[in-house]
Structure formats: C-alpha cells, structure tokens
Image (cartoon, helix red, strand yellow):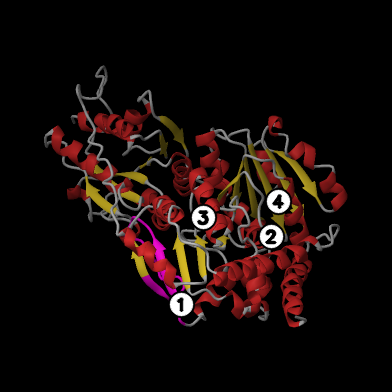
C-alpha cells in the first residue's frame, strides 16, 4: 500500500500553521501516527483516553488559535471525541480530526472495530470529508486536506472530520522511508476584508440608553484598550461576563448577576450592542428578555448570531474591533440620558461590590474561599474555571486584572475541564490555575493519564462531596432524591489522583490550613500542586443564597 499521501498530511498541516497533534494509540491509525510523529515541526502528544485527548487538543487550539490535529483508530475511538467536538463547535475552536477507518467494503460485515464513521459528529462538525482512495493521485488527497483545514478556520472556526480508510498492511514497509512530496505547497487562503455600511453608526444618535455586552471570547489587549476608550468617551456601560476576558475595561460591570436579581427598571437599555459568544449571567438574560421596546445589534463577521435576549434586530457583519474603533472615532457627544444611564449601572455595580466586600472574611464557605482565592491569583496567570459552581462563583464575585480566563461554555459540560487546562498549559508554558469541583475533577481524571503533564499547573478542588450546584437550584433541592441522584453523593477525595500522577498534595479544612498554603501553592517553581478544599454543602448554599438575599433586601430599603 502506497502511504505517500498519508505522509504529506503533516507537512500540509504544518504549512497551514498547525503546531500540535494529539494521538491516541491504535493500529489502524498507525501510518498517520508515524507520519505526524516523524514531522520535525509538529509537537505530538500520546494520550490513551480519546475523550481526554480531544479536550487536551481543544485546550491547545484555544491557546494557539490554530487547528490541533486529533488522530485515532477505527471503531468507538472516534465516538469518544464527541463531547470535545461539540464544545469546539459551539465555542468556535478549530480542530482537524483524522479518524482512521476500515475500507468501505468491510463496513456492515461485523468486522472488528467497525462502526459507521462517515459524518460521525453530525451537525456538531463544521464539515466532513472522505479521504480519497490511496489508489487515486496525490493531488486529490492534497485537495481534501486543503479543504478540511480551510473549513476548520474560515468564518467561525470549528471542528472538521476527515475519515481515512486504510487497507492492510498499513505500516510502512521495512527499509522504506517516506518523506513529504517535493515542492508540496499548502493553499492558505487569506480572509477577505469585511465591508459594512458605516452609516449605521449614525443611527446610534436615535438611542439614549446604550448598553454593551461582551460575550465569551479570547483576551485581546487592543480590543480592551479601544473598548475602554469608547466606554469612557461615550459613557457606555460595558458588561464584562467573566468569560468575556473584558474585565480589564475600566469601570467594567462585573457583578450583574448579583444586582440584576432586583430587575431595576432604571437599568433598562433601549439598545444592546453585543459581541462574542455566550454569557454566564442568568439574571442578565432574564432581565433583558423581560424588557419592552428593546433593540439588539450583534457584531460578528460570521454567520453565528444568536437571539440570546429575544430582541435581536440586526446583525452587523464586521470584526468587533473594527466596529468599536469606528464608533470611537465618531464625533457624537454622550447625551445627558446616556450619562445618567452609565451612572445608574455604575451605582448598581458598586452596591454589589460593597456587599461582596462585607462578606465575613473568616466564614468557611465556598463564597468566602472563592473571594479570597480570586484575590490571591498572581497576575499573568491563565485561569480555568470548571463548569457548575466554579464559573458561577467567579462571575458573581469578579476577577482582577491581568488574568486570561478559560471555560468550556460552548456546551457547559463538566466532562473536560481538567483536560482543557492541561492543553492550554502545554501550548503556552504560562502558569495555569484550574478551579474545579470534586465531581468535575474526578470525572475527568484521565486528563493526567499520559506522559506530558506540565509542572506549572495548579489545581484547586472544592470538595463538598457532590454536585453542589443542584442544592442551589430550587427544583432538585426540594426533592428527596437530591443527595443520591442529583448531587451524586460521593466520599472520594482527590488525594489518590494527586499521588498517582505526582502532584504535590495540600489540603484545607479551615482558614488556618489555607493561610499556611498560599505561598507554597502559588510558587510555580515548586512543580505541579493540587490543593483540595473541604467544605459543607449546606453551609455553602446558605452563604451563596444569603448574598443574593442581601442584595434584594438592599433594593427594598431604597
């Protein structure tokens, strides 16, 4: 079997900007594995568990903004990629998935490790390609890979599957060395510059209460600077959800989920301008969905706008930075009503901040522990927030400057938080901190089952013996099955995982324990460390609910 086209794939990927490949062991994918492992410019990682492998690849792509290649054998292996593929699709992360397969004439004959692999991820992949028969010419194979890479990165980035059927023998013949075809050249298409009708900016004068909402996105210094200038010049409140990475905008609104529990009508905008992907804040969504006579513009160069607030009026097809820059350059003056609107949002945010500042600093609950921990994180750390309560605490309490925030909010699952953090840490070498609950941590323990663990990784596991978020939700909290079937009561700790994978293990049951751990924990020269914080789920619920109750009581007194 002539494997030349297989050995051309890594070189095409490299020319396209691919830096990493994550490979899970198998035989049917042997030629792909060997081809990538022998490419001098692509860093390859061997990760046995395909589910973890896919989330590690997701993390690598989140950091590099380039496709990471995923390689697996045939059969159920590729199905294990599905959770990360769905996350990549909704979080717009580029992945190139190479699933090795049996030849078409063996499918449906109960041959070993055969399933229906064509379009394996359905609507959760941007595109699907059949790799051409090895009997066809090389140009056809090259075109397939060109198109797959282009599909992964054009418009809204995302995952793309290429199914590669191999006949036996699928290992290179002895004494035969394959190299990339001479003169091989990837076709990298430059993005076409976006054009838009700038006269839309003139319509802004028709509105006197404009609100900007930043959805999930990468940290972009130039966008933060320009957005800050715009907000200051035109008195526009900027809601910076924790996953938006816009928290460094001066006077950014970060406590909206807390103070919007009051549904204050003075905070109602007449125009929302949003950009980015999802937001965490449930109270923000409920508040805006309940508003009347509201216009919503969403800024995106891609066909990916969602009617999150039930008022979507217009999609402006332009890059966010370009739109904000043009708006900044207009000579429009902020109206008195806009200035007052800005003040109302600032006052509400400051009231919430004051409540948070008054939290008892020695109250041993997750609310206080998260508050203190978020204040201790060193600048220039990559902060990963697991789903369920970790990201909600951070969104309610707010993060400080000079942190880059990551969270798998495409699908909001707990299944790959550990692995995604490992992936970004491998890609960057940046000091990385993961905040997670016990269930999410234990669910993804195979994130560490490989030989590539970085030393500059820190993990805090909040162990309250189950899925604490269900205790916060009125529906399941009122059911007798809460502890057994919703929280999934568990009595394990992270200690055995820490010891198995060579993390230094610290515990905290009190403030005395925690006070003595900070310096060691945040000394990133000490190797990887896992800190497990134990608390009571019922006390955690009381403190978190009490914070929102105080916010409501404060409103009723005014």
Observer-side mark, 1 or 2, equals: 1
Q: Nearer the viewer, mark 4 or mark 3?
A: 3
Q: Callout 3 environment at 10 Å: few (<14), some (14 to 19), or many (20+)? A: many
- Which SS class for mark 4? helix
The CA distance from mark 3 to mark 1 is: 22 Å
Q: Using a 10 Å C-alpha cutoff, classify the residue at mark 4 as few (fewer than 14 neighbours), some (14 to 19) or many (20 or more).
A: some
User: Could you tell me residue 1's position as x and y percent?
Assistant: 18, 31
Residues at marks 4 and 2 touching, judged by CB atoms closer than 8 Å: yes
The magenta stretch is: 293-313
Q: Earlier in the sequence, mark 3 or mark 2?
A: 3
Residue 294 tag number: 1
The residue that disc 3 covers is 230
Label 2 belongs to which residue? Answer: 397
Q: Indicate which disc, 4 or 3, sits on the residue closer to the N terminus.
A: 3
Residue 281 found in image quarter: bottom right
Q: CA distance from mark 1 to mark 4?
A: 35 Å
């Amino acid at each position: 079997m002539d494997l030349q086209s297989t050995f051309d794939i890594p070189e095409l990927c490299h020319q396209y900007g691919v830096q990493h490949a994550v490979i899970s062991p198998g035989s049917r994918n042997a030629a792909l594995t060997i081809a990538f492992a022998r490419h001098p410019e692509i860093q390859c990682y061997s990760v046995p568990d395909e589910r973890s492998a896919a989330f590690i690849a997701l993390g690598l792509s989140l950091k590099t903004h380039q496709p990471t290649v995923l390689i697996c054998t045939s059969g159920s292996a590729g199905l294990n990629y599905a959770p990360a593929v769905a996350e990549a699709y909704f979080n717009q992360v580029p992945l190139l998935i190479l699933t090795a397969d049996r030849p078409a004439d063996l499918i449906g004959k109960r041959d070993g490790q055969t399933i229906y692999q064509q379009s394996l991820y359905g609507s959760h992949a941007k595109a699907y390609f059949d790799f051409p028969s090895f009997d066809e010419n090389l140009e056809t194979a090259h075109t397939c890979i060109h198109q797959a890479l282009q599909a992964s990165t054009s418009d809204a980035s995302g995952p793309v599957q290429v199914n590669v059927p191999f006949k036996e023998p699928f290992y290179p013949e002895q004494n035969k060395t394959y190299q990339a075809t001479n003169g091989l050249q990837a076709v990298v298409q430059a993005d076409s510059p976006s054009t838009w009708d700038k006269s839309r900016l003139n319509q802004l004068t028709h509105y006197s209460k404009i609100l900007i909402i930043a959805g999930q996105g990468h940290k972009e210094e130039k966008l933060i600077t320009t957005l800050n200038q715009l907000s200051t010049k035109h008195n526009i409140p900027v809601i910076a959800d924790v996953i938006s990475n816009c928290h460094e905008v001066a006077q950014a609104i970060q406590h909206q989920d807390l103070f919007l529990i009051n549904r204050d009508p003075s905070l109602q905008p007449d125009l929302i301008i949003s950009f980015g992907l999802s937001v965490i804040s449930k109270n923000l969504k409920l508040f805006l969905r309940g508003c009347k006579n509201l216009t919503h513009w969403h800024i995106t160069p891609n066909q990916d706008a969602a009617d999150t607030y039930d008022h979507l009026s217009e999609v402006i097809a332009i890059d966010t930075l370009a739109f904000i820059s043009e708006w900044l350059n207009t000579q429009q003056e902020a109206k008195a009503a806009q200035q007052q609107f800005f003040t109302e949002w600032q006052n509400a945010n400051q009231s919430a901040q004051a409540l948070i500042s008054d939290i008892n600093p020695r109250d041993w609950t997750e609310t206080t522990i998260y508050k203190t921990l978020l204040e201790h994180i060193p600048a220039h750390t990559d902060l990963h927030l697991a789903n369920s309560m970790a990201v909600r605490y951070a969104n309610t309490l707010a993060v400080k400057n000079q942190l880059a925030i990551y969270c798998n909010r495409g699908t909001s699952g707990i299944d790959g938080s550990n692995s995604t953090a490992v992936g970004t840490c491998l890609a960057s070498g940046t000091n990385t901190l993961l905040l997670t609950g016990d269930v999410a941590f234990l669910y993804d323990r195979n994130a560490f089952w490989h030989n590539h663990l970085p030393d500059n990784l820190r993990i805090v596991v909040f162990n309250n013996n189950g899925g604490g978020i269900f205790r916060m939700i009125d529906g399941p909290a009122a059911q007798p099955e809460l502890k057994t079937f919703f929280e999934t009561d568990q009595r394990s700790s992270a200690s055995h995982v820490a010891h198995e994978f060579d993390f230094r293990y610290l515990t905290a049951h009190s403030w005395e324990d925690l006070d003595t751990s900070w310096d060691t924990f945040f000394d990133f020269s000490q190797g990887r460390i896992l800190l497990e914080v134990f608390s009571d789920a019922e006390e955690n619920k009381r403190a978190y609910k009490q914070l929102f109750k105080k916010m409501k009581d404060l409103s009723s007194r005014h």
